[in-house]
Image (cartoon, rainbow, N blue to C red):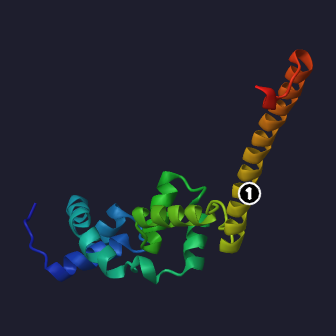
Amino acid sequence: MINQSYTEGFRSMAVAKLTSPGSPGLNATAQELGIPAPTLFGWRKKYANSYFMKNNKKKNNEWTPEYKLQVIAETLLLSKKGLGEYLRKNGIYSSDLEEWKNNFYNSQKGAGRPRKDPKMQELEKREKELTKNISRKDKALAEMSARIVLLKKSHLLFGGTEDEE
């Protein structure tokens, strides 16, 4: 086999053609360009992420929320192979898709208990405090009532009043 040198432009063009949507595949593209398939495979491995995807990929914040939701819906039932093809075709990284899914799922979860109005919180605190005071006073009243009853019974049993002692 003859050792040929290919320009950087030709290499990036070949990788772009190979990774473009609707590409016929590695062997067909290599045959069409007149280069060995293993060479094109190596170029794709070396250049695809650094040239093609970097230049054609939108930044994560450039995708609209509607598009992100559409992508999530379209990829939910795809197999791994189908998912890979879909992501390559649309220039999306799988890490971006996972981030979109997580953000969507997290946004759908309840944020916990709703915050109460500060006035309502203050009133509930005051009510709790008053209830506690009433309970304490009821217990003290019950204790004093019991003492009075016992004192009256002791007077009936033993006679006399407290003043006599």
- Residue 45 pos. (x, y %): 24, 62
Q: Which quadrant of the structure image shows residue 7?
A: bottom left
Residue 97 point in image, percent of width and height: 47, 65
Note whether 14 is above or below 84 in the view shown.
below
| Quadrant assignment, res 2 | bottom left
Q: Can you name the residue that lies furthest to the right here?
A: 156
The front one of 9 and 86 is 86
Give coordinates of residue 142: x percent, y percent: 81, 37
- Placement of the C terminus among the 4 image quadrants: top right
- Crowd band around label 1 with a 10 angstrom C-alpha radius: few (<14), some (14–19), many (20+): few
Q: Which residue of the protein is positioned furthest toward the front in this rendering?
A: 164
Question: Secondary structure beneath disc 1?
Answer: helix
Is the residue 152 above or below the residue 26 in the image? above
Q: Is residue 112 above or below residue 21?
A: above
> Does 13 sit above or below residue 110?
below
Q: Nearer the viewer, residue 43 or 35?
A: 43
Q: Quickly name the residue at label 1.
A: 130
Tell which of 49 and 23 is nearer to you. Answer: 49
Given the image, on which type of amino acid does mark 1 rest? Leu
Q: Give residue 108's position: percent from left, percent from top.
A: 63, 64
- The number of discs equals 1
Q: Viewed as shown, does residue 3 lie left or right of 26? A: left
At a point 79% along the width and 37% down the height, the residue shown is 144
- Tell me which corner region of the image, top left, top right, bottom left or bottom right, holds residue 72: bottom right
